[in-house]
Protein backbone atom coordinates (compact mmCIF):
# COMPACT_ATOMS: atom_id res chain seq x y z
CA UNK A 1 0.00 0.00 0.00
CA UNK A 2 1.10 3.55 -0.70
CA UNK A 3 1.53 5.79 2.33
CA UNK A 4 -0.99 8.64 2.44
CA UNK A 5 -0.04 11.28 5.01
CA UNK A 6 -2.79 13.73 5.94
CA UNK A 7 -2.34 17.04 7.77
CA UNK A 8 -5.62 18.40 9.13
CA UNK A 9 -6.45 21.73 10.71
CA UNK A 10 -9.31 23.74 12.19
CA UNK A 11 -11.35 23.76 8.98
CA UNK A 12 -12.27 20.09 9.12
CA UNK A 13 -13.48 20.34 12.74
CA UNK A 14 -15.33 23.61 12.11
CA UNK A 15 -17.72 21.73 9.83
CA UNK A 16 -18.67 19.60 12.84
CA UNK A 17 -19.43 22.74 14.85
CA UNK A 18 -16.13 23.00 16.73
CA UNK A 19 -14.01 26.11 16.82
CA UNK A 20 -10.50 24.85 17.41
CA UNK A 21 -8.64 28.11 16.95
CA UNK A 22 -9.25 31.80 17.42
CA UNK A 23 -11.71 33.74 15.29
CA UNK A 24 -10.65 36.53 12.95
CA UNK A 25 -11.14 39.07 15.75
CA UNK A 26 -8.38 37.39 17.77
CA UNK A 27 -10.78 36.03 20.39
CA UNK A 28 -11.45 32.39 21.19
CA UNK A 29 -14.99 31.92 22.51
CA UNK A 30 -14.81 35.49 23.82
CA UNK A 31 -11.35 35.16 25.41
CA UNK A 32 -7.99 36.49 24.34
CA UNK A 33 -6.09 33.31 23.46
CA UNK A 34 -3.24 34.25 25.78
CA UNK A 35 -5.67 34.15 28.73
CA UNK A 36 -6.66 30.54 28.09
CA UNK A 37 -3.91 29.01 25.94
CA UNK A 38 -0.58 30.09 27.39
CA UNK A 39 1.53 29.29 30.45
CA UNK A 40 1.11 32.92 31.56
CA UNK A 41 -2.67 32.61 31.40
CA UNK A 42 -2.50 29.39 33.42
CA UNK A 43 -0.32 30.97 36.09
CA UNK A 44 -2.55 34.04 36.29
CA UNK A 45 -5.91 32.26 36.47
CA UNK A 46 -5.87 28.45 36.38
CA UNK A 47 -9.57 28.28 37.30
CA UNK A 48 -10.51 30.26 34.19
CA UNK A 49 -8.33 28.02 32.01
CA UNK A 50 -9.78 24.83 33.49
CA UNK A 51 -13.34 26.08 32.98
CA UNK A 52 -12.56 27.10 29.40
CA UNK A 53 -11.40 23.60 28.48
CA UNK A 54 -14.24 22.01 30.44
CA UNK A 55 -16.65 23.88 28.16
CA UNK A 56 -14.70 22.78 25.08
CA UNK A 57 -14.97 19.16 26.23
CA UNK A 58 -18.71 19.44 26.82
CA UNK A 59 -19.07 20.80 23.29
CA UNK A 60 -16.84 18.10 21.80
CA UNK A 61 -18.79 15.29 23.48
CA UNK A 62 -21.80 16.21 21.35
CA UNK A 63 -19.88 16.76 18.11
CA UNK A 64 -19.90 14.15 15.38
CA UNK A 65 -17.41 13.47 12.58
CA UNK A 66 -18.36 14.91 9.20
CA UNK A 67 -17.86 13.55 5.69
CA UNK A 68 -14.27 14.79 5.65
CA UNK A 69 -13.43 12.65 8.66
CA UNK A 70 -15.27 9.56 7.44
CA UNK A 71 -13.63 9.64 4.00
CA UNK A 72 -10.21 9.62 5.65
CA UNK A 73 -11.26 6.47 7.50
CA UNK A 74 -12.57 4.91 4.28
CA UNK A 75 -9.26 5.54 2.51
CA UNK A 76 -7.58 3.13 4.95
CA UNK A 77 -9.02 0.33 2.79
CA UNK A 78 -6.72 1.28 -0.06
CA UNK A 79 -3.93 3.31 1.54
CA UNK A 80 -1.67 3.24 4.56
CA UNK A 81 -3.14 6.40 6.10
CA UNK A 82 -1.35 8.44 8.76
CA UNK A 83 -3.16 11.52 10.05
CA UNK A 84 -1.27 14.39 11.64
CA UNK A 85 -3.76 16.81 13.15
CA UNK A 86 -3.40 20.27 14.60
CA UNK A 87 -6.79 19.80 16.26
CA UNK A 88 -7.16 18.73 19.88
CA UNK A 89 -10.61 17.12 19.46
CA UNK A 90 -11.19 13.40 18.96
CA UNK A 91 -13.27 13.51 15.78
CA UNK A 92 -10.76 11.51 13.74
CA UNK A 93 -10.87 8.79 16.36
CA UNK A 94 -14.67 8.94 16.49
CA UNK A 95 -14.71 8.40 12.72
CA UNK A 96 -12.59 5.28 13.18
CA UNK A 97 -9.20 6.45 11.91
CA UNK A 98 -6.55 4.18 13.41
CA UNK A 99 -3.31 6.16 13.07
CA UNK A 100 -3.65 9.72 14.41
CA UNK A 101 -0.85 11.94 15.70
CA UNK A 102 -1.99 15.02 17.65
CA UNK A 103 0.51 17.86 17.29
CA UNK A 104 -1.12 20.20 19.77
CA UNK A 105 -2.24 17.75 22.43
CA UNK A 106 -5.58 16.12 23.18
CA UNK A 107 -8.65 17.67 24.73
CA UNK A 108 -9.66 14.49 26.54
CA UNK A 109 -6.37 14.11 28.35
CA UNK A 110 -4.89 15.81 31.40
CA UNK A 111 -1.28 15.96 32.46
CA UNK A 112 0.74 16.64 35.57
CA UNK A 113 2.13 20.12 36.19
CA UNK A 114 5.06 18.46 37.96
CA UNK A 115 5.99 15.94 35.26
CA UNK A 116 4.81 16.46 31.67
CA UNK A 117 5.27 12.76 30.94
CA UNK A 118 2.45 11.87 33.33
CA UNK A 119 -0.57 11.95 31.01
CA UNK A 120 -4.03 10.65 31.86
CA UNK A 121 -7.03 9.86 29.66
CA UNK A 122 -10.21 11.59 30.77
CA UNK A 123 -13.52 9.75 31.00
CA UNK A 124 -15.49 12.88 31.84
CA UNK A 125 -15.51 16.50 30.68
CA UNK A 126 -14.61 18.07 34.04
CA UNK A 127 -11.13 18.94 35.30
CA UNK A 128 -11.09 21.13 38.38
CA UNK A 129 -8.74 22.84 40.79
CA UNK A 130 -7.71 20.22 43.31
CA UNK A 131 -7.60 17.38 40.78
CA UNK A 132 -4.07 16.08 41.22
CA UNK A 133 -1.67 13.57 39.71
CA UNK A 134 0.00 10.73 41.59
CA UNK A 135 2.76 13.15 42.64
CA UNK A 136 0.25 15.43 44.32
CA UNK A 137 0.56 18.17 41.69
CA UNK A 138 -2.36 19.93 40.00
CA UNK A 139 -3.51 18.48 36.68
CA UNK A 140 -3.75 20.73 33.61
CA UNK A 141 -5.13 20.15 30.12
CA UNK A 142 -2.76 18.15 27.91
CA UNK A 143 -2.73 20.93 25.33
CA UNK A 144 0.29 22.55 23.72
CA UNK A 145 -0.13 26.23 24.55
CA UNK A 146 1.39 29.25 22.85
CA UNK A 147 5.04 29.53 23.83
CA UNK A 148 5.40 25.80 24.55
CA UNK A 149 7.37 23.24 22.56
CA UNK A 150 5.52 20.85 20.23
CA UNK A 151 6.74 17.46 21.48
CA UNK A 152 5.23 15.42 18.62
CA UNK A 153 6.82 17.56 15.91
CA UNK A 154 9.80 15.24 15.34
CA UNK A 155 7.43 12.28 15.02
CA UNK A 156 5.31 14.21 12.51
CA UNK A 157 8.39 15.12 10.45
CA UNK A 158 9.42 11.47 10.14
CA UNK A 159 5.89 10.48 9.13
CA UNK A 160 5.82 13.21 6.48
CA UNK A 161 9.19 12.21 5.06
CA UNK A 162 7.81 8.71 4.39
CA UNK A 163 4.76 9.94 2.45
CA UNK A 164 4.00 8.74 -1.07
CA UNK A 165 1.13 11.25 -1.19
CA UNK A 166 0.55 14.30 1.04
CA UNK A 167 -2.97 15.59 1.69
CA UNK A 168 -3.60 18.82 3.60
CA UNK A 169 -7.17 19.56 4.73
CA UNK A 170 -8.67 22.60 6.43
CA UNK A 171 -5.59 24.53 7.47
CA UNK A 172 -4.32 28.01 6.65
CA UNK A 173 -0.72 26.75 6.53
CA UNK A 174 0.27 29.77 8.60
CA UNK A 175 0.58 28.23 12.09
CA UNK A 176 4.13 27.07 12.72
CA UNK A 177 5.78 24.70 13.20
CA UNK A 178 2.96 22.58 11.68
CA UNK A 179 2.90 24.66 8.48
CA UNK A 180 6.51 23.68 7.83
CA UNK A 181 5.70 19.97 7.53
CA UNK A 182 5.02 20.31 3.80
CA UNK A 183 8.71 21.12 3.33
CA UNK A 184 9.67 17.66 4.62
CA UNK A 185 7.65 15.82 1.97
CA UNK A 186 9.59 14.55 -1.03
CA UNK A 187 9.53 17.08 -3.86
CA UNK A 188 8.35 14.56 -6.45
CA UNK A 189 5.21 13.33 -4.63
CA UNK A 190 1.71 14.75 -5.25
CA UNK A 191 0.52 17.22 -2.60
CA UNK A 192 -3.22 17.88 -2.44
CA UNK A 193 -4.55 20.87 -0.49
CA UNK A 194 -8.26 21.11 0.35
CA UNK A 195 -9.27 24.50 1.74
CA UNK A 196 -11.67 27.23 0.55
CA UNK A 197 -8.92 29.80 1.03
CA UNK A 198 -5.86 28.95 -1.01
CA UNK A 199 -3.00 28.81 1.51
CA UNK A 200 0.59 29.79 0.66
CA UNK A 201 2.90 26.99 -0.49
CA UNK A 202 6.07 28.90 -1.41
CA UNK A 203 5.87 27.67 -5.02
CA UNK A 204 6.49 24.05 -4.07
CA UNK A 205 6.19 21.56 -6.96
CA UNK A 206 3.38 19.05 -7.53
CA UNK A 207 0.77 20.93 -5.51
CA UNK A 208 -2.89 20.45 -6.49
CA UNK A 209 -5.46 22.81 -4.93
CA UNK A 210 -9.11 22.06 -4.30
CA UNK A 211 -10.55 25.33 -3.06
CA UNK A 212 -13.48 23.89 -1.15
CA UNK A 213 -14.45 22.91 2.39
CA UNK A 214 -13.58 19.42 3.56
CA UNK A 215 -17.10 18.02 3.15
CA UNK A 216 -17.29 19.00 -0.52
CA UNK A 217 -13.62 18.68 -1.42
CA UNK A 218 -12.87 15.31 0.16
CA UNK A 219 -15.23 13.29 -2.10
CA UNK A 220 -13.25 14.66 -5.06
CA UNK A 221 -9.97 13.72 -3.39
CA UNK A 222 -11.26 10.22 -2.70
CA UNK A 223 -12.28 9.77 -6.33
CA UNK A 224 -8.87 11.03 -7.51
CA UNK A 225 -6.93 8.78 -5.14
CA UNK A 226 -8.97 5.68 -5.99
CA UNK A 227 -8.63 6.43 -9.70
CA UNK A 228 -4.87 6.50 -9.21
CA UNK A 229 -4.96 2.87 -8.04
CA UNK A 230 -6.41 1.59 -11.32
Image (cartoon, rainbow, N blue to C red):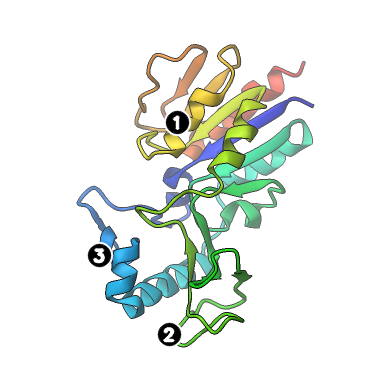
Q: Secondary structure at mark 1?
A: helix
Query: 15 above or below 130?
Result: above
2 or 3: tag closer to the N-terminus: 3
> Marks 2 and 3, how far apart in space?
20 Å
Query: 200 above or below 105?
Result: above
Left or right of 130 in this view: 158: right
Q: Which residue is mark 3?
A: 31
Q: Which residue is mark 1?
A: 180
Q: Which residue is mark 2?
A: 129
Residue at far bottom of view: 130
Q: Dot 3: few (<14), some (14–19), or many (≥20) neighbours within 10 Å?
A: few
Q: Secondary structure at mark 2?
A: loop
In the image, which is nearer the foreground, mark 2 or mark 3?
A: 2
Any part of residue 213 in sight = no
Q: Position of residue 22 (x, y in %)?
A: 30, 53
Left or right of 47 in this view: 54: right
Q: Dot 1: few (<14), some (14–19), or many (≥20) neighbours within 10 Å?
A: some
| Position of the C terminus by quadrant | top right
Amino acid sequence: MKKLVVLTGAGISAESGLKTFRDSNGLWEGHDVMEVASPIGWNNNPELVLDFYNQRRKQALNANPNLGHTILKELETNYDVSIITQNVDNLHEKAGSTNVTHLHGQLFQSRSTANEDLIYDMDDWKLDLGDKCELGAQLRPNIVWFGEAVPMMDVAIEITKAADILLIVGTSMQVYPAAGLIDFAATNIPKYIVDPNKPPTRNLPNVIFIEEKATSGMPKIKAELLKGLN
